[in-house]
Image (tube, helix red, strand yellow):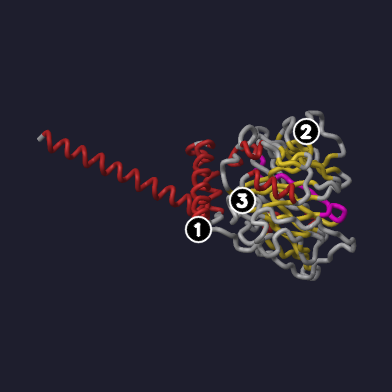
Amino acid sequence: MKIRRNLKRFFSWRKLTVFIFVFFFLFLGSLFFLFSKNSESAALLADNVLRPLIGDKAVISLEGFVFNIQDGIFHLYKTKPSLANYHTLVKTVSASSVTVKPPPNIIPYVDKSNPLDGEGVWKKIEGTNLYTTFIRTDNTRPYSVVNLVFIPMKVYMLGAVAGTKYPGGPTFTPGTGKVPLDIQESGRLIAAFNGGFKEKDGHYGMYSDNITYVPLRKGLATLYIYNNGHLEISAYDGNPIPQDVVTARQNGPFLVLDGKTTAITSMGIDYWAGTATGGYITWRSGVGITPNGDLIYAVGPSLTPTALADALRLAGSVNAMELDINAFWVRFNIFAWDSVKRTYTYFPLVKGLADGGKEFLNGYQKDFFYLYKE
């Protein structure tokens, strides 16, 4: 009888162990599938189900685990990326008459003797004064491409809006989450791209149109938009925000400072809250300012903060900072105005990038920046 009871206990524990193993295998497999497919479901699952259930830190660790497995698979099966698939706009967009020259072409950084076709060569996006190229900056990941956009600020103006839910914060104030109607209806909208993290993923500040959505933190990299259109990325000094500042948005420390990639991007600690930690390989985005005050936007998959920083620096940024990360939250849409139908068509910058055009026009839960003609 004793032997029989022991056998029953053994097989009961064995069944339980198998059950737990199968459950976690299927659970992690499902998560990996969702995250790897750039799925909205993955983002909603992480934010609306897993975070309340197991907590922010556990979700961050889980995301990092999934991202790093995905990166390991890329290491095994990917040696070079598919060429970036740039979209061509319809010709109903009227470009400015101002002649704009892009920055000098970028000398390939990875595999210099065998660059990809078009790597580092600036090409104009039809119907706009925007230029785009791509560059690889991670020698350990030749499959990782950073897509770059040169935005001439003598032609365009930059605006920002808070989302309907985020950045959030203890004194939550919702924004409109959409491009202002006067800019939409005038046909002046050119592009829109993602903002920064939610407040709980770093407590990074945002101020816009006389509203402080999240208090700014002293010493962090801050993108300032002035009422005359001037842009600046500098450290917030803790003083009251000047009256001529329309928007101030923070999202961590500097990626590039005074033309040099900063050490913090390699350390992956200190202010790297949320899934921005340097140990995670994922979609990332960022912005930089050139010596002439023009804007550089960067976005790409399988990136470390250092790879993102190096791309922004090579593109000519003097100072630069990271914006949002992860596949579903990074987005850059170009808009084409049809003056007859009085509607926009819109395109993601590159294949694989989330399409946020509809939400930018009608209401998006997160903050973002928009680009328009004066």
Whether residue 123 appears in this view of the structure is: yes
Q: Residues within 10 Å of mark 1 (few under 14, many from 20)?
A: few
Residue holding disc 1? 77
* Residue 287 coordinates in the image, percent (x, y): 73, 47
Question: Any magenta on residue 156?
Answer: yes
* Residue 361 coordinates in the image, percent (x, y): 71, 56
Residue found at x 52% / y 55%: 74
Residue holding disc 3? 139
Farthest-out residue, left: 1
Q: In the visual, does 190 lie left or right of 195?
A: right
Q: In the visual, does 116 lie left or right of 316?
A: left
Q: Nearer the viewer, mark 3 or mark 2?
A: 3
Q: Nearer the viewer, mark 1 or mark 2?
A: 1
Residue holding disc 2? 236
- Nearest the eye: 132 or 20: 132
Q: Residues within 10 Å of mark 3 (few under 14, many from 20)?
A: few
Q: Which residues are magenta?
A: 152-167
* Residue 4 coordinates in the image, percent (x, y): 13, 38
* Residue 168 coordinates in the image, percent (x, y): 66, 39
